Amino acid sequence: MNLQEYYKGNEWKAYEYFGAHIEMDGVWFRVYAPGAKKVTVIGEFNAWHDTELTCQGRGGVYSGYIQGAKEGQMYKFRIFHHDGSVTDKADPYGFGMELRPNSASIIRNLHAFSFTDQEWMKNTDKRYNQPFNIYELHFGSWRANGDCWYRYEEMADVLIPYMHEMGYTHIEILPLNEHPMDESWGYQSTGFFAPTARYGDCNGLKQFINQCHMAGIGVILDFVMVHLAVDDYGLCEFDGTPLYELSSGDVQKSEWGSYYFDHGRGEVASFLKSCANYWLSEYHFDGLRFDAISNIIYWKGRQECGVNQDALLFVKSLNEGLHNIHPHAILIAEDSTDFLKVTAPVAYGGLGFDYKWDLGFMHDTFRFFENPPERRREYYSSLLFSMHYFYNELYLLAFSHDEVVHGKKTILDKMYGEYEEKFAQCRTLFLYMMTHPGKKLNFMGNEIGQFREWAEYRPQDFEVLGQFPMHMALKRFMRDLNYIYRAHPALYDAEYNRNCFSYVIDDKAWDLVYAYIRDAGGEQILVIFNFGEMHYEQYPVRLSGNHMLKELIHTASDIYGGQIQCHTQDISVRNGQCRINLEPYSGRMFQIL
């Protein structure tokens, strides 16, 4: 490794130098601690007694070779401070860690597993003009393996068949880096290079990803690069000084109580760049979803606090470098701001992300569906608003984990009405989401009508499928909808081209009827909604020319829990006019022939 490039923030493989690396009949240990008076390594190989490491000149790098140290053994770095205090720290670049509440790093052989997914890696890409439908999950609470978590390699055997059954294209997993508290869901990290021991080790995770790829399923990792946990064995004041975090001021701590990374410091930039590259290179993840990008753009994530120029320069350099190293990798920003060019290339003044979560679409849509029909007329225009700004960025529509916790209710429970009305609304909501331009993401449980808010300590309520027919009907609807999305290019091809979307009905606020056409890939799709409680018999719809409308899905069909026994109906368009029956709280999708 070039240390000068590391100090400048230009190193992408620092993990190949720092940390614990097995060589011959021992292990090389290296750690960066420029503020320390002395550094030792303690572990199982020396009965937890100090073995002093050598400092290389004034660079702050401490290293040493310990013969007899081997894979699977635990260790820590012991940092001696100039004030006489001592702190035992986990390895910042450690490839494995103990399960909480323990915190030692573990020597791992990063190259013990051999991937067989070469064909997948050769052909995978950023999914432009292709179906991109993500199933977001928390690894530990999707399903339980008896009273235990599924191990990484075990999860593949149950999750892959479910993905095939339901028709999703990709999995997105909440952070898998080691973290001390289950309640943080992985967002408060203490082991940025260590797959959490809750579900196994690095080889098990690689096996899981390899199996997903062999089955034609992409895997995206939720990646945290904004903040670090405050636990004393982690990165916080690593060498007795704020080495990784901001040093002072009212912007040092985040809203979550953690410390912000100092993105303007070269060693920190190299640490985070190497970390992002590590998960893509060593584990073959297909992409990264970057958490809390608003806190990268603005100090404390607030526009009134000003732009964080150092962090912006870092993220531009990060994304540009990742695009060069991993041209196929999908880089997704969770950003709630209206900052411009988040998904524009860095060369054109952008931040360089491939996609951005459209949180405005999510908030506007939920607000509409939470209200009764008489109030929805006030919010009719909010359904139109998303298309006013949609072409500013490459948006991804996300109904994520953040929307089903902390008193927000689940997606189904957000819907207006009583039990059956909620299901009708939910089917219509998902038809709207899946036919609106933009890539898709749904959190686990959305597809089965989860009523209970998500809790990280409890698996999803899949048992409702065998107990309550409406939940099973919703699951069937979601499966059919996912496969229709994948089968029809009009729903994903050229979706960021404004010429491929047009309104048919966008001025019927009193009727609460709304319709549009998706036109791409050599086909046209008409989608029409009745968001109100009135039944409309033969509602007039104007289209150009003469056509046949072939129905693809009807949310009110009895097979999905509705009341309509005629599952699909072909409708003739003559001289640009046709009439369509619209059930209350329903949507219909047609292919225009």
Image (cartoon, rainbow, N blue to C red):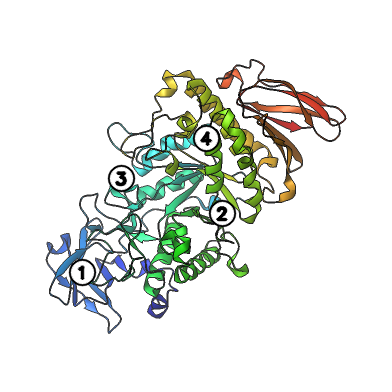
Q: 10 Å neighbourhood of mark 2: few (<14), some, or many (≥20)?
A: many
Judge from the rendering whether residue 417 lies leftward or rightward of residue 47; answer left or right. Answer: right
Q: Residue 183, labelled with which disc?
A: 3
How far apart, in angstroms, are the residues tagged by discs 1 and 2? 45 Å
N-terminal label among 1 and 2: 1
N-terminal label among 3 and 4: 4
N-terminal label among 4 and 2: 4
Q: Is residue 181 above or below residue 365?
A: below
How far apart, in angstroms, are the residues tagged by discs 1 and 3? 37 Å
Q: Is residue 505 above or below residue 35?
A: above
Residue 404: where, in percent of width, then height?
42, 38
Looking at the rendered image, the disc whose residue lies closer to the viewer, 4 or 1, is 4
Identify the amino acid type marked 3. Answer: Glu
Q: Residue 164, labelled with which disc?
A: 4
List the residue tagged with mark 1.
Answer: 66
Which residue occupies 24% across, 52% down?
98
Residue 88: where, in percent of width, then height?
18, 64
Q: Residue 355, labelled with which disc?
A: 2
Q: Nearer the viewer, residue 378 or 181?
A: 378
Q: Secondary structure at mark 4?
A: helix
